[in-house]
Amino acid sequence: MHHRLRPVDLAVGLGSHDLGVATCTAQLYRRGLFPTIVFTGANAPTTVERFPRGEAVHYREHALELGVPDAAILVEPSATNTGENIDRTRDLVRARGLDVSSVLLVTRPYQQRRAYAQCRMRWPEVDVVCASQEVSLDDYVAGIGDPDRVVDMLVGDTQRVWLHAERGWAVPQDVPAAVTAAYDRLVAAGYTRRVVEEGRE
C-alpha cells in the first residue's frame, strides 16, 4: 500500500506460511519503530507442516534468533484467520493494559490491503499502517519455492478484498478494473485452490 513507515505503539506480525513476516518485523523493531510486537496465528492447512507448534510460536523463535528481546514479544497463538488475528490481538493488548493508538501490520506482500481493510473495520480506534518485505515477485516466489502456491494465495487474497467488504468484515477498498480482469484470467487458468466458493467462509 506504499504507506510511509513511522513510529507506532505496536507491531502485529500476522501468521502465515511465510517466515519473512517475522524477519521483516524484527528488522523494523531494530529500526526503533515500535516497542512491542504481537505475533498472532495458530495453524492453517497451508502452515501446519512447516510450523507444527503454530505460526506465532515459530515467528517468535525466529525473531529471537534475529536479536529481538523476549520481553518485547507477545504471542497470540489461537487465531486461524485475519479477522481473528486482529480481534485477538486487540483483546490481548487490552488485557495487558497496553495503551495502543497506532499499529503497524506486518504481512505477506500481497496481504497488506486485506489486512488493512479488516483492521479498519474491527479496530477502528487505532491508526493503521502496513509493511512487508520489499521484494520482487520473482524473488518472493523463489523464496517460497512453490510458484503455484504463491499465485493461488495471491488470487485468494485478492478475492477476499471485495468479498470481506461485501460481508461486512472489512471496509471497502477500490479495486481497479485491471486487477479484477487479472483475477478473472487466473481463475480461468485454474488458480482456484484459495478461492472462496459462494456461501462459504
Image (cartoon, rainbow, N blue to C red):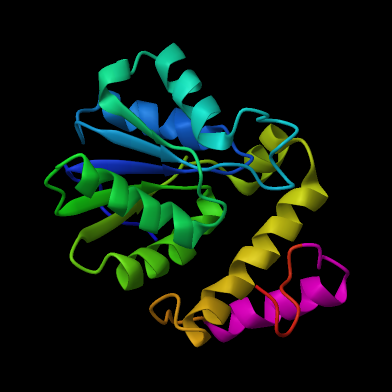
The spot of residue 43 in percent (x, y) is: 63, 42
Quadrant placement of the N terminus? bottom left
Question: Left or right: 197 with respect to 154?
Answer: right
Quadrant placement of the C terminus? bottom right
Question: Left or right: 174 with respect to 136?
Answer: left
* Residue at screen point 43% across, 22% down: 63
Instruction: Please tell me whether residue 85 is drawn above or below residue 68 in the rendered image.
Output: below
The spot of residue 199 in percent (x, y) is: 70, 84
Instruction: Please tell me whether residue 127 is drawn above or below residue 8 in the rendered image.
Output: below
Read off the magenta span: 176-193
Viewer-nearest residue: 170 or 29: 170
* Residue at screen point 69% across, 40% down: 47
Instruction: Please tell me whether residue 117 is drawn above or below residue 31 in the rendered image.
Output: below
Instruction: Please tell me whether residue 17 is drawn above or below residue 178 in the rendered image.
Output: above
The spot of residue 71 in percent (x, y) is: 26, 19
Viewer-nearest residue: 55 or 132: 55
Viewer-nearest residue: 135 or 28: 28
Viewer-nearest residue: 141 or 78: 78
* Residue at screen point 70% across, 77% down: 200
